[in-house]
Each structure stands twice: as structure tokens, then as C-alpha cells.
Amino acid sequence: MMNEQEIFYAMALTRLTNFNFQQALELYRIVGSAQQIYEHRNDIGDIVEDCSPHLMEALKDWNEPMKRAELELKFMQEHQIRALTLNDDDYPQRLCECPDAPIILYYKGNADLNQAKIINIVGTRQCTQYGQDLIRRFVNALREHCPEVLIVSGLAYGVDINAHRQALENGYPTVGVLAHGLDQIYPYRHRETAAKMLEHGGLLTEFMTQTNADKANFVRRNRIVAGMSDACIVVESAAKGGGLITAEIAQSYDRAVFAFPGAVGMTYSEGCNNLIRDNVAALISNAKDFVKAMGWQEEVRRQQALVDGIERNLFVDLSPEETRIVCLLQQTNDLQLNILSVKSGIPIGQLTALLFQMEMKGVIKPLAGGIYHLLL
């Protein structure tokens, strides 16, 4: 976590540089912190040799940006909003690698922005029934292959909101990257979904409060969506659209890009088909394709092998009869003593002794009514 002083100066610096991302980022990385930039505001040219005269002049007057930062800090404290600067461990580390990463982000939620697997799902605001079905089937099937994934999108109409809602439906955390401050939700009709996301995901933005959802801000927002993710998945898009911009940015960041194909001649399939044709995106038709292309199935197999290995080690301590009982309870847990005896072929007297030994080993526990419950 960064201290409040650094957050304060980072907020002011962002406002001072007027969202000249690369210039501000380069300056920040050379000097090391926003507070250090402030302290060297009058001799910054001695530290940064090629600092432009315009920037050197701008850095001399911090009065208005600092007053604005004070107001923002007060709002954040009142609404439990966190600020993440580039040097903060909780800042999205994938985004740190990008040449135009924001110096500061504002975040409200509980999702880990550095989770092992992060994808974004983007596309047209005019999502058709075909697109909605693709998202539903994809997220639902992804759950079977990769139970732990953070799903990112932009909370906009169409593909975005469907991606967020399907993520929530399937128990995935989901983060919406906004084109405005955290004092509003745009579009307003998505406020209920946004509220659920705060409980299982979050809302993220680089914009201070009182920032309108202007057109240019959506393009800026797209680079955060692309940069904080391992992969970009375009579901539906016309020949031009925000989803295509996100895909192109993702490609420039060396992220994996995928697109679902659509029928030739269909308006909202044209963008995806063009991405595939131009080798910007790889074609996928289901979650299995995607997981295989990302190489994630090997990791899932390794995790399962580890679990299987633990179970095998546990079985080493069990006799053949005890192992038979465990296998029966794995198929149908909470079986009554008489039923266990019939299914296992072990007489009641011998079975009672075996069950007592297994209870001592922490493998099962007895319940009321002579029922036995498997703990493995």
C-alpha cells in the first residue's frame, strides 16, 4: 500500500500533465515517485535531460492540481475508494508493463487485480441473441476448465454487461473499467449489476470524480481493459467499434487476442471476421479452444494431479476394505450402516470396527441415525 502523501502527489501530477500518459509515465519512472517530481519541480530539467520546456513550465505550478487532489482524497475516504499508484503492489502488474499505463487508478471492490488468470470480454453495444448465447455458453463452460478467472469488461451496453452478468452468474469475480469517476455509474441502468460487482469483483477507473463519460475517455479506458488482462476475447463487433480498438491495443501489448466468428454478411460479425482474416485474433468457437490456446489446461491438470496425489497418499494408510468404503462414500456420501454393509459386502460386526478405525484416522465421521459421512 502506498502512503497518502504519494497518492496525493500522484493525483496532482496526473491532473498537471493533462493525461499525457507516456510523458507522465516516463517522468515518473525516471524520478521514481510523484512526490520526488514535486520536490524537483523547479530543477526537473537537471534530472530528465530531454524534458520538454512546456512540461518544465507546467510542473512549476501545482496549486490547482493539489487543491483538486485534496477534494478527491476526501471523497475517497467517505466512499471507501482506494487509490493504486504504479509502485503499489496491488496495482495491476500486467498494466505496469504498458508504455501508457496510468500513474494512478481508483478502485472499489474486492477482486485481486493480479489474479493468476485474467481475461477481458468485449464487443458491440448492439449485442445480438447470437452474441448473448456465445457469452453464456463460453463463461459457463470456462468454469469447468478454469474455476479461477477474473473477467474484465467496460460495463457498457451489449457484450460488456452480458459478460459481467454471466461472470456473476457463474461465480467468477468481475471488474468493470469505467470511462468516468466513481461518483457515478454509466449507463445508469447498470447500477444494480455494478452494486453486485462491488461484492464480487469491483469497479476501476483512472478518472477522478466529476469526470463526464466523454467519447475520448472510452478509448482511454480500453487500454486499461487490454493491459490488465492476459487475453482479449471479442464476441461481436461491426466493422468499426470499441471492441476492435481494445483488440488492437491488446495486440500491441503482446496480449493474446481471440474472436468468435460469425455469419458472412452479418453486421455485428464483420469486425470479428476481419480480425481473424487479418491475423489479429485467433478463431475460437468455445471455451475448450480458448483454454487450450492459452495453455491453461496443463496448469489445471497439474493442480488436479496434485489433488489426486494427495488422495493416493491418503489411501496408502487405508486397508483394502477401508478403501472400498471410501470409494462407496465418494459415489454416494452419508450412507447408513446397513446400506454400507450390503454395498461393501462386509459383515456388520467387522464393518463397525473398520468404521471406528477410519474415524480415528479422520477419514469419516458418524452422524445421527447410524449414518457415516466422508471427510476426504
Image: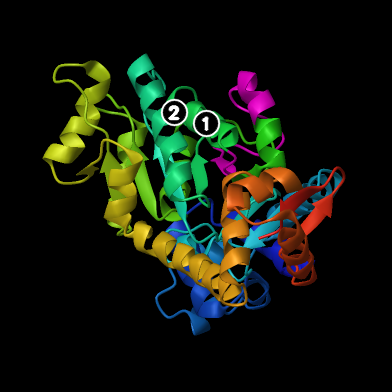
Residue 99 lies, with reference to residue 109, above or below; the image says below
Query: Regarding mark 2 in the picture, which secondary structure is present there?
Result: helix
Give the magenta-colored segment's residue range: 171-193
Q: Is residue 349 visible?
A: yes
> Which of marks 1 and 2 precedes in the sequence?
2
Coloring scheme used: rainbow
**Horizontal and vertical percent position of residue 129:** 37, 15
Residue under circle 2? 136
What kind of residue is marked 2?
A: Arg
Give me the residue at 57% from left, 59% from top.
324
**Horizontal and vertical percent position of residue 289:** 28, 45
Q: In this image, 113 relative to 134: left or right?
A: right
The label number, if any, that marks residue 166 in the structure image: 1
Q: Residues within 10 Å of mark 2 (few under 14, many from 20)?
A: some
Q: Which corner quadrant holds the N terminus?
A: bottom right
Distance (Cα) linking label 2 and label 1? 6 Å
The label number, if any, that marks residue 221 in the structure image: none
156 and 212: which is toward the camera: 156
